[in-house]
Image: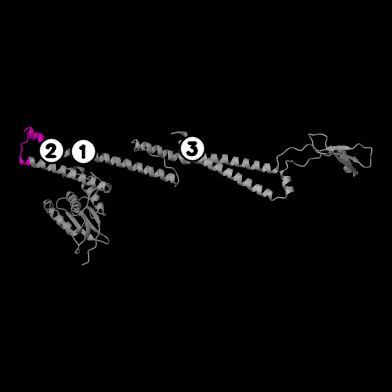
Amino acid sequence: MRFFQRLEVRLSLLMALVAVTTSLITIALNTYQRERTFRELPPEVRDFLRRNEGRPPNLSLTPELKEMLAAGRELRVQMRPSPDPANPNPVFFIAPLDDPTALPVQLQAPPRPRRPSLEVRLQQNLLIAGLVAAVLGVLVALVFARRIARPIEAISAAANSLAQGDLSARIPTPRGEDEVAQLARNFNHMAASLERLEAERKAMIADIAHELRTPLAVMQGRLEAIQDGILPLEQSEVDRLHYQTRLLSRLVEDLRTLSLADAGRLNLVLRELDLGEQVRRLVATFQPALEAKRITLEFKLPSQPVLVQADPDRLAQVVGNLLTNALAHTPEGGRIELEVQAEAAHATLRVRDSGPGIPEEALARVFDRFFRVEASRSRATGGSGLGLSIVKALVELHGGLVAARNHPEGGALFELRLPLRPARSS
């Protein structure tokens, strides 16, 4: 960067220009005011002030004159022009009146120093004061310009490092609450967010690769065993391969759903729905799984319709993922509670299981992608760690909220809220 393109140099020049301009304007205004004031003075006073005369001449009396004056003798004073061009002060001849024969005492003041007039001295003093003020202003401008430009230059350097891929670039946060300090704190916050997002992106890519590799490795191993004649090509093997294919298809579809939701391209076909009725229909499809694990389902519905504006397919996906999660974490012989309720301005769906609950350190991450509270068991049951992430994305697309917490009596509780649509009057 060229010297004159640096921010601190331009700030310094700008402040110096302001200081010099202010001093020149002050000098000009004072000169104009002085001239106006001088014009208002009487001519003789104005001429006296403008004469380049110094102080009045200093006459030093000789010892003889001091003796005459002390004796009270009468003196005769005669003034003559000075014969010396270098000393224009008149010459005084002083002699006593009572002694005509006494030689007169010659007395002449020394030449007066040549000094500028009062008007010129005022102008000089004003000019000196203006120059001193301008120099001080330039020095102060340099100090403040450097102080202002230092954090901005640090932000520029950190931003360049950030652009080169160094997401760990940070700047020392300056003190204070001014705009520069706020800019520095916002930059550090942005850099931290980018670093976190990049780490999450890398982790997500690794998780996707792992999730895709697991069923592919199973399929490849069994197909190679069939090719080598180790395993017979039976219906059971075809069923196992088909199961792994379904896992892959579900993972790809989940990833597609999340990517469309992130890009804002997931289209919703909104309709007026009764949330309670939709949940009732969906629960019927889970009856075989509930009976297989001997899980009791307690279903609480209001007597009146709970109307919401939602996409029926996406709503079924949300409720299905919540029930699947509850079913996976509820032990055999356990209980799942499902409640639909209409509150002031929203409809609420609560899903509670009787499982071990969610560890406190995992509560903040249950909706993160590929996050599993129990990774080994989730993989064993075919979970991809995307179900709750899809729930959160779809609920937010509907303008709702979803939260997870542990119930005081045990088990995990998921609460979903959607905007409530009032029933139409007949």
Q: Residues within 10 Å of mark 3 (few under 14, many from 20)?
A: some
Q: Is residue 12 above or below residue 37?
A: above
Q: Which residue is mark 2?
A: 219
Q: Nearer the viewer, residue 44 or 156?
A: 44
Q: Which residue is mark 3?
A: 9
Place of residue 80 in the rendered image (x, y in percent of width and height, measured from the top left): 85, 39
Instruction: Give the main secondary structure of the magenta stretch.
Output: helix
Disc 1 versus disc 3: nearer the observer:
3
CB-based contact (under 8 Å), mark 1 and mark 3:
no
Magenta residues, as a range?
215-236
Q: Is residue 314 among what the camera can see?
A: yes
In the picture, measured across the screen, residue 148 lies left or right of residue 334, that is: right
- 259 is within the stretch colored magenta: no
Place of residue 133 in the rendered image (x, y in percent of width and height, measured from the top left): 58, 42
Q: Residues within 10 Å of mark 1 (few under 14, many from 20)?
A: few
- Nearest to N terminus: mark 1 or mark 3: 3
- Nearest to N terminus: mark 1 or mark 2: 1
Q: Nearer the viewer, residue 123 or 211?
A: 123
The span from disc 1 to disc 2 (Cα, nearest Å) is 15 Å
Residue type, label 3: Val
Q: Which mark is residue 209?
A: 1
